[in-house]
Image (cartoon, rainbow, N blue to C red):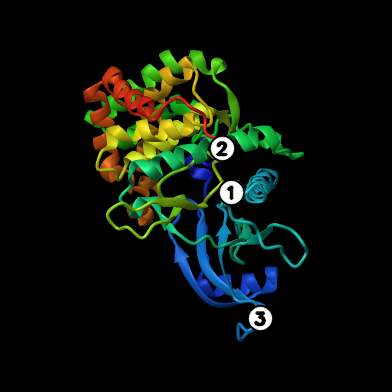
Amino acid sequence: MSSRNDCRPQALTKPALEEKAVIELVDRVFGLKVSWIRPLPSYDDQNFHVCVSRNEDGAEGAAECVLKITNSEDSQEPDLIEVQTQAMMFLHAEGFPSATPYLTKDGNTMSLEAGDTGPGSKKYMVRLLTYLPGTPVAKIATNPQILYEIGKLAARLDKALAEKFHHPSVKTLHRGQFIWNLANVPLLHQYIYALGQNKYCEVVEKVIQQFEEKVMPKLSSFRACINHGDLNDHNILVDSASASPEDPQYRVSGILDFSDMSYGYYVFEVAIAIMYLMIESSDPLGVGGHVLAGFESILPLTPEERGALFLLVSGRFSQSLVIAAHTALHYPENKEYLMITARTGWKHLMKMFEVGQAAVEQRWFQIAGAYGNHLDP
């Protein structure tokens, strides 16, 4: 995969620390004892679910947390990681269910650590974050209620960041050629070879062409903001707020992984959420209407933004599927995790183009319209 900040895939090194080294690191850097440790799946970082305490027997404040070891390329941008971490803290203070960092022994939110002791050893930024309970949306049967709530959450989150979040290094979120920014769909040209010559390649080429012709010229008319950038079905945790198994009511209990944060546009966030929530849905083409209704209860889209939604969702499908295929060529040992989206993603993208933009948009806008045009408080 490309580095998270430019398009040089060979530059990225995913951390591969052994559990014994991780236990020692948590003690040395954070002054905490690990009572148990479990690896967590990840795209290009290394994550562990750990239980820590102030002493060996766990009698003093045992707590579950997540150790996040950032890949070698992103670790070279401490200001960017610091802004992302401060954004998480800001959102937590604003009432959003985001994690907060444990401070190091030196009172910092993160520490740059060597991966090993050999020659040419890579350095990785390490953070210890509070653990957020809940079930990933990917593991539940979504219903209109939770799709609406996630859409609403996406709008509230971006609005809070745009209107209230300030930090001296916030300019680092202008990430230029960052491959995961939705404005950079045209950068997929250089990775499309990973698909081979087939029907998938043809539809992605069509997406890129239409994106360049119809979306890029309109970007300046979209309303700018800071995007979380990765509100996918594994980064949103929920718990059940009702006891009825026939009609479960969910609430969002956690927002994970702020490493794709960048300056973008409000419409990017809703498009990204729609795309990922389609992945496991039993009614994928209906998802957009419910997510859009929730989003527009806080931030109604302009006609220009609504008109770009189909190609933005298609563009994110293309980014996810092409970059995953490219990354799997370079990191075959992580292929199973990398290709999660591909299991149904290609089917959904092909279906969108088979049905056509006009029909898909009509479905989305009809569903969203049925909620009414009122703004929630």
Q: Which residue is mark 3?
A: 60
Alpha carbon separation for disc pair 1 and 3? 28 Å
In-front residue for pair 104/376 = 376
Residue type at the position of mark 1: Phe
Mark 1 vs mark 3, foreground winner is: 1
The answer to which of marks 3 and 2 sits earlier in the sequence is: 3
**Residue highlighted by disc 2:** 156
What amino acid is labelled 2 in the image?
Answer: Arg
Question: How far separated are the C-alphas under marks 2 and 1?
Answer: 9 Å
Q: Earlier in the sequence, mark 2 or mark 1?
A: 1
Residue in the picture at 39% in, 57% down: 242
The kind of residue on which mark 3 rests is: Glu
Compare residues 365 and 186 and report the one nearer the observer. Answer: 365
* Residue 96 tag number: 1
Quadrant housing the N terminus: top left
Near mark 1 (Cα within 10 A), the count class, few <14, some 14-19 or many ≥20, is some
Q: Element at badge 2? A: helix
- 31 up-or-down from 194: above or below: below
